[in-house]
Amino acid sequence: MSSVAVTGIGELVSCDGSDPDLLGIRSKAALIVEDGLVAWIGPAADGPSADSEIDVDGRVIIPGFVDSHSHLVFAGDRGSEFVARMTGQPYDGGGIGVTVAATRTAADEELTRLLATRIAELRALGTTTVEIKSGYGLTVADEVRALRIARRFTPETTFLGAHVIPAEYARDRAGYIDLVTGLMLQSAVPYARWIDVFCEPHSPHAFDAEEAREVLTAGAEAGLGMRVHGNQLGPGPGVQLAVELGAASVDHCTYLNDADVDALAAAAETTVATLLPGVEFCTRSPYPDAARLISAGVAIALATDCNPGTCYSSSMPWVISLAVREMGLSPAQAMFAATAGSAKSLRRTDIGRLVVGNRADLTVLDAPSYLHLAYRPGVPIARAISLRASGETQAE
Ligand code: NIG
Ligand code: FE
């Protein structure tokens, strides 16, 4: 058993749920890690000895960010689509087909190399756990390939065969649903923990409520947990469906009516509303009112949705600064939502909080306080730190 003492912590943000703001902040703290787990937290003066020491010289330690929504297995580029968004052209999901075509023609090695680069990028921004969806293959072989590659980097893999109806099935929606809920699902299950669906009546490419219900129900029967893309482009049935089926998360929640907020509040123990403000930024859409959700009692998470169409950024610090500036969250609420909140959306209790027994997934901030995450937008103050001799972490 090898142990590491992390010392010189100016501010330790545990996100352990204590204190009115849930952050459980300690100053002048130390933390002992044994075999990758938190073994002790307390005042620096009382710290037990360890085999080795990392002195962070007065910096902040927070739980590594949990990015619970990303689409990182893809090839190709859609920069010109981003420019169109900035000049007012609305997003309708049609560009997904461009990425599907580019991803299908990429070799396994190329997709793996692109993903490894993106994982290194998000770790350098402080993320230690990332959920990765398929959804740019949309054939049995290409969806399985995306999940196999993603599995090499994270246990949080999500089968998103129901991202859009691929071009070759444009005249046979029912045939594609049969494939997604049949052979494609069976082939994906060994490599996936979750199933997701783009439930969006405002996109001609995505799925309506009944199609989404079929997809989610089939996935749950096959043993997968449920997640939903819902209420992204306009008011819609995604939130109500997610709550009714007991999905772990419903993501985007850009357009919510009072009944949606009430349903999410009543389901707060089960279903998390995952907010993705980078998408609103990159598609010039209105931001949801996150402060209203919190005061109604909704459980919220923050994630990037990093993908080539609606938000090509893997920066959780940037997401936090947007959540504070544009969605009405306090810095403490945004900090909690990006760690413990997003861990909850993955039904994980071993990450997102620095408490004894949890994974020692640590992120260091080159700052005197976690407030600087929102206060210094765009400045690279956060990075994940590797404590294990092997350098092994979930997101590497
Ligand atoms: O979460 N809305 C559906 N899927 C992604 C976008 C995918 C793309 O445009 O390539 C999202 O925004
Ligand atoms: Fe998404």
Image (tube, helix red, strand yellow):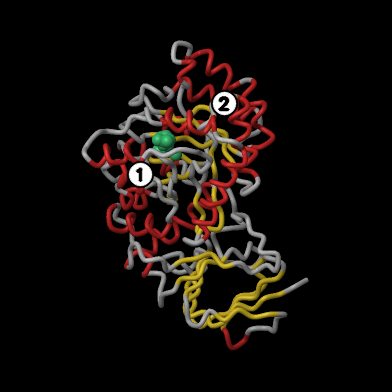
Q: In the drawing, what numbered circle is on residue 155?
A: none
Q: Name the element at disc 2.
A: helix
Q: Which residue is mark 1?
A: 279
Question: Disc 2 versus disc 1: distance between alpha carbons?
Answer: 27 Å
Considering every residue shown, the one lying at the far bottom of the view is: 45
The residue sitting at 62% across, 38% down in the picture is 108
Three-letter amino acid code of the residue under disc 1: Val
Residue 208 rendering spot, x and y as whole percentages: 42, 22
Residue 140 rendering spot, x and y as whole percentages: 61, 25
Instruction: State the residue in front, 228 or 151.
Output: 151
Considering every residue shown, the one lying at the far right of the view is: 1
Residue 270 rendering spot, x and y as whole percentages: 52, 43
Considering every residue shown, the one lying at the far top of the view is: 171
Report ligand 1 position as a quadrant. top left
Quick check: 121 above or below 255?
Answer: below
Quarter containing the N terminus: bottom right
Instruction: State the residue in front, 57 or 12.
Output: 57
